[in-house]
């Protein structure tokens, strides 16, 4: 049930528990227990909401920053990753294979704030060798969801 | 014009679904539970392969029986899932949907006056196709208490010395019924005893929610007398691509291919290239869609249980077939009033044969949000009926 449960709540974390049990063909209590276990094991890390901020009047700028770093003796990339992810404005930090080491997503209210973060905080860290900042211009799809659905149900209303 | 048109064709009744369609399409904001096709888009990698085929200029006829590569993949698929070995060179023909395979299969086997046994409720085209082929359709009215499975007794009692073909369609549209191995073994015994052919329409085979689908062609002594029909519409959400196929004994496929060659030439080339991709790399898509259908199936059955609406548990396709006899109306009356009063369209069981009387076909090829609203309305409707 675990995989099916996870893929259901990954798409809709607000789903009613009773309905969740029906969809999975299980007893409600089993689902509740499994959810508790998943939380305890740190597999479920939160129940977030996917928001298309572009449709609001709230200004948000998102940047992807590629960072090259010097790994530290005994701690590899973990120490430097931690120094970076502790900043609350950093939304995500990934260790990446290939031409650079860390990929950071950063969300701020303006370009200026992002520039400030990169120049004042990120670049000044000892182990950071270089950074390359990319600004996101438009989000088409996020977390598997297409933001602007182009078509509805185009099927004939009744068919054999 | 004074000369009469073909009598056989004129004698065919128009599909019962059509009538209903006309009412629904004039009604704005109606929710439909009436479709017989998946709500998913064709998976992108499959569509992409179709586009790529066009870009490469694959715009010509293929061989009559279909691209060799596709026939090979079809044989791999049947071997992988059903354990049946077909020869891609002479035991497969790629058709325009499963529907064409039904038509040419019947035409390849029927002589005037032969009887074709059609268990109903069933998909709407078997009976007319049998009539057009010159056969006499013999209907078996399947029973709800058998979960709409065909029993050997029912089959025995329909057989005469003119019987030639049995049409078997499981997982079934409209009932959602399946037949499991032990059910099929009993049918196979009767079929072999009376030396009949079987047309096994397995278009919904991938959508089975209780173990893996079993084909009657995989049973001993059955491959040589069975035309196995399948296709891409339901499993891969490819209805509009119009692509299906038939596998069977070389002698029958040879005759079918002749009709196909003269009437159709070949199935659409773009679709055939896309279908190769579907069979090669589409297993996971099927799994994901199947899981989603199964969740909705459970959702509907639970909703019926909560409103005390009688319904056997169907394990296949994407239909449930609840019984509405307690309301003392015909299926058509029920469906029409449900549509008028609650703006939900479901197809009356009688559209699939007389034995569908007292039942309603509800399709769950819809999003959960849609089904939730529809079940709310169904509950209101039957509560009102019960209080009257």
Image (cartoon, rainbow, N blue to C red):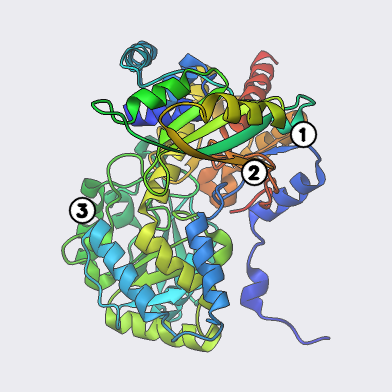
Residue B372 circle label: none
Position of residue B314 measured from the top left corner of the image (x, y, whole percent): 41, 37
Q: Is residue A149 left or right of residue A82?
A: right
Q: Residue at x 36, y 16 (%)?
A: A27
Q: Is residue B197 visible?
A: no
> Residue tagged by mark 1?
B340
Chain letter of mark 2 equals A
> Residue tagged by mark 2?
A140
Chain letter of mark 3 equals B
Reply above or below: B316 against B275.
above
Position of residue B73 measured from the top left corner of the image (x, y, whole percent): 33, 69
Q: Is residue A102 left or right of residue B331?
A: left
The residues tagged by marks 2 and 3 sit, at their Cα atoms, a distance apart of 53 Å
In this orientation, which residue lies closer to the viewer: B8 or A77?
A77
Position of residue B37 measured from the top left corner of the image (x, y, whole percent): 56, 51
Reply above or below: B192 against B336.
below
Q: Residue at x 49, y 28 (%)?
A: A92
Q: Is residue A135 left or right of residue A22?
A: right
Reply above or below: B172 against B31.
below
Position of residue A156 measured from the top left corner of the image (x, y, whole percent): 68, 52
Question: Residue lying farthest left?
Answer: B220
Rendered image quadrant of residue B8:
bottom right
Q: Is residue B240 left or right of residue B291?
A: right
Kind of element beneath mark 3? helix
- The earlier-in-sequence mark between 1 and 3 is 3
Residue B185 circle label: 3
Kind of element beneath mark 1? helix
Reply above or below: A30 against B314.
above
Between tags 2 and 3, which lies in front? 2
């Amino acid at each position: 049930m675990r995989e099916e449960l996870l893929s259901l709540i990954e798409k809709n974390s607000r789903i009613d528990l009773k309905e969740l049990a029906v969809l999975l063909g299980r007893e409600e209590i089993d689902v509740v227990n499994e959810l508790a276990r998943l939380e305890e094991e740190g597999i479920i890390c939160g129940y977030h909401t996917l928001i298309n901020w572009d449709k609001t009047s709230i200004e948000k700028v998102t940047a992807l920053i590629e960072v090259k770093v010097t790994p530290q003796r005994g701690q590899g990339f973990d120490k430097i990753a931690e120094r970076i992810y502790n900043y609350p404005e950093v939304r995500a930090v990934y260790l990446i294979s290939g031409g650079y080491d860390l990929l950071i997503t950063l969300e701020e209210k303006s370009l200026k704030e992002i520039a400030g973060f990169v120049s004042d905080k990120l670049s000044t860290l000892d182990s950071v060798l270089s950074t390359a900042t990319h600004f996101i211009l438009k989000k088409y799809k996020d977390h598997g969801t297409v933001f602007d659905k182009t078509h509805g149900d185009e099927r004939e209303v009744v068919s054999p | 014009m004074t000369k009469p048109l073909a009598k056989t064709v004129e004698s065919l009744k128009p599909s019962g679904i059509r009538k209903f369609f006309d009412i629904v399409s004039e009604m704005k904001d109606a929710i439909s539970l009436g479709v017989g096709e998946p709500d998913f888009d064709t998976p992108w990698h499959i569509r992409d392969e179709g586009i790529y085929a066009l870009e490469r200029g694959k715009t010509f006829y293929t061989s009559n029986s279909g691209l060799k590569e596709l026939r090979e993949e079809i044989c791999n698929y049947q071997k992988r899932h059903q354990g049946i070995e077909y020869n891609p060179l002479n035991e497969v023909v790629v058709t325009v949907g499963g529907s064409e395979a039904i038509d040419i299969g019947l035409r390849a086997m029927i002589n005037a006056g032969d009887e074709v046994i059609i268990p109903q409720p069933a998909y709407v085209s078997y009976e007319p196709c049998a009539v057009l082929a010159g056969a006499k359709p013999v209907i078996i009215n399947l029973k709800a208490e058998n979960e709409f499975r065909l029993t050997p007794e029912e089959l025995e009692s329909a057989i005469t010395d003119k019987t030639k073909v049995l049409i078997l369609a499981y997982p079934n549209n409209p009932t959602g019924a399946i037949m499991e191995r032990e059910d099929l073994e009993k049918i196979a015994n009767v079929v072999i005893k009376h030396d009949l052919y079987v047309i096994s329409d397995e278009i919904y085979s991938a959508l089975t929610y209780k173990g893996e689908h079993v084909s009657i062609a995989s049973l001993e002594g059955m491959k040589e007398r069975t035309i196995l029909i399948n296709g891409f519409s339901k499993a891969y959400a490819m209805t509009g691509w119009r692509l299906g196929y038939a596998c069977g004994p070389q002698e029958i496929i040879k005759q079918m291919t002749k009709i196909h060659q003269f009437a159709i030439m070949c199935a659409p080339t773009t679709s055939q290239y896309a279908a190769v991709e579907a069979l090669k790399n589409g297993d996971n898509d099927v799994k994901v869609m199947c899981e989603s259908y199964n969740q909705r199936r459970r959702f509907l059955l639970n909703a019926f249980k909560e409103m005390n609406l009688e319904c056997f548990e169907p394990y296949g396709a994407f239909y449930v077939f609840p019984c509405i006899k307690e309301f003392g109306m015909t299926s058509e009356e029920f469906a029409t009033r449900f549509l008028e009063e609650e703006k939900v369209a479901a197809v009356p069981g009688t559209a699939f044969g007389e034995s569908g009387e007292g039942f309603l076909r509800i399709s769950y090829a819809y999003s959960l949000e849609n089904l939730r609203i529809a079940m709310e309305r169904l509950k209101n409707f039957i509560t009102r009926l019960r209080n009257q």
